[in-house]
Image (tube, grey):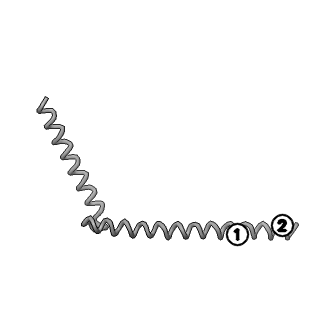
Amino acid sequence: MDYSKEISNLKNRLDDAKIKRARAESTLESLNKQKEELLVEIEKLGVKPENLEIEIANLENEIDGLLFEASKLLSEDI
């Protein structure tokens, strides 16, 4: 067995792993920053992040109701 080739191969794999780890950490940091920015924006809109799913459901219901009402009004006009 050629130990120098094996060691060189392992070193290259370790270097690649270090690069991938650095990229992943950078991506994670960026995503966490974006998450914080979105949470601030959500708060500015007057919605608490923990109530976001409820707020989305309420808005979907409101949209459905408005679409139904618009459809009903259009069918009455024709």
Q: Mark 2: which amino acid?
A: Lys
The 10 Å Cα crowd at callout 2, few under 14, some 14 to 19, many 20 or more, is few
The residue under the point 18% across, 46% down is: 66
Q: Identify the image quadrant of residue 39.
A: bottom left
Residue 14 vs residue 23: left or right?
right
When the figure is inspected, residue 67 is found, relative to residue 13, above or below; the finding is: above
The residue under the point 20% across, 51% down is: 62
Q: Are marks 2 and 1 in contact (CB under 8 Å)?
A: no
| Mark 2 and mark 1: Cα distance apart in space | 15 Å
The residue under the point 87% across, 67% down is: 2
- Disc number lying in front (2 or 1): 1
When the figure is inspected, residue 44 is found, relative to residue 64, above or below; the finding is: below
Residue 66 vs residue 13: left or right?
left
Residue 56 vs residue 31: left or right?
left
Q: Position of residue 75 (x, y in %)?
A: 15, 32
When the figure is inspected, residue 74 is found, relative to residue 47, above or below; the finding is: above
* Screen quadrant of the N terminus: bottom right
Residue 27 vs residue 16: left or right?
left
- Residue at numbered disc 2: 5
Mark toward the start of the polypeptide (2 vs 1): 2
Q: Position of residue 61 (x, y in %)?
A: 22, 51
- Residue at numbered disc 1: 15
Q: Position of residue 46 (x, y in %)?
A: 24, 66
The 10 Å Cα crowd at callout 1, few under 14, some 14 to 19, many 20 or more, is few
Q: Nearer the viewer, residue 45 or 49?
A: 45
Q: Mark 1: which amino acid?
A: Asp
Q: How many marks?
A: 2
The residue under the point 76% across, 69% down is: 10
